[in-house]
Image: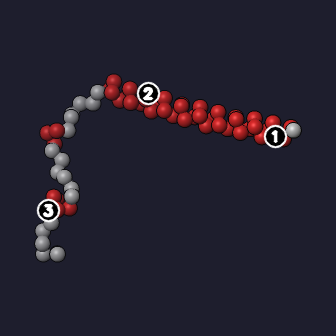
Amino acid sequence: MSAEQLKTNDLGIEKINIDKIPTKVDINFLISRAREEKKKENKTNYIFFIIASFLILSIGIILSL
């Protein structure tokens, strides 16, 4: 095995074509992606807040009986 030369295709590694990599970055695309991620974070935070408040409220009601 040491005498054999391994090719990149044999290893499952694809060569990256430098011509296909874009040289410019669209700032509007990056900003919109950041806003979408922020919306997802806010949504999950609201869900966790609602679940936690519901648990605290239900435990308070059970303890008051």
- Identity, as a three-letter code, of the amino acid under mark 1: Ile
Q: In the rendering, which numbered label is found on residue 50? A: none
- When asked about the image quadrant of residue 26, the answer is top left
Q: Residues within 10 Å of mark 1 (few under 14, many from 20)?
A: few
- When asked about the image quadrant of residue 7, the answer is bottom left
Look at the numbered discs 2 and 3 and tell me whether their residues touch, using CB distance below 8 Å: no
Instruction: Give the position of the N terminus as an image quadrant.
Output: bottom left
Query: Mark 2 sits on what residue?
Result: 35
Separation of marks 3 and 1 at Cα, in angstroms: 68 Å
Q: What is the x, y in percent for residue 50?
A: 64, 33
- Identity, as a three-letter code, of the amino acid under mark 3: Lys
Left or right of 37, for residue 3: left
- Identity, as a three-letter code, of the amino acid under mark 2: Arg
Q: What is the x, y in percent for residue 56?
A: 74, 38
Q: Please tell me whether mark 3 or mark 1 is closer to you in this view.
A: 1
Instruction: Give the position of the C terminus as an image quadrant.
Output: top right
Quick one: 45 or 6, which is closer to the camera?
45
- Is the residue 4 above or below the residue 43 in the image? below
- When asked about the image quadrant of residue 20, the answer is top left
Query: Mark 3 sits on what residue?
Result: 7
Whichever of callouts 3 and 1 sits on the residue coming sooner in the sequence is 3
Q: In the rendering, which numbered label is found on residue 62? A: 1
Separation of marks 2 and 1 at Cα, in angstroms: 41 Å
Say which residue appears at 33% left-offset and 27% top-offset: 29
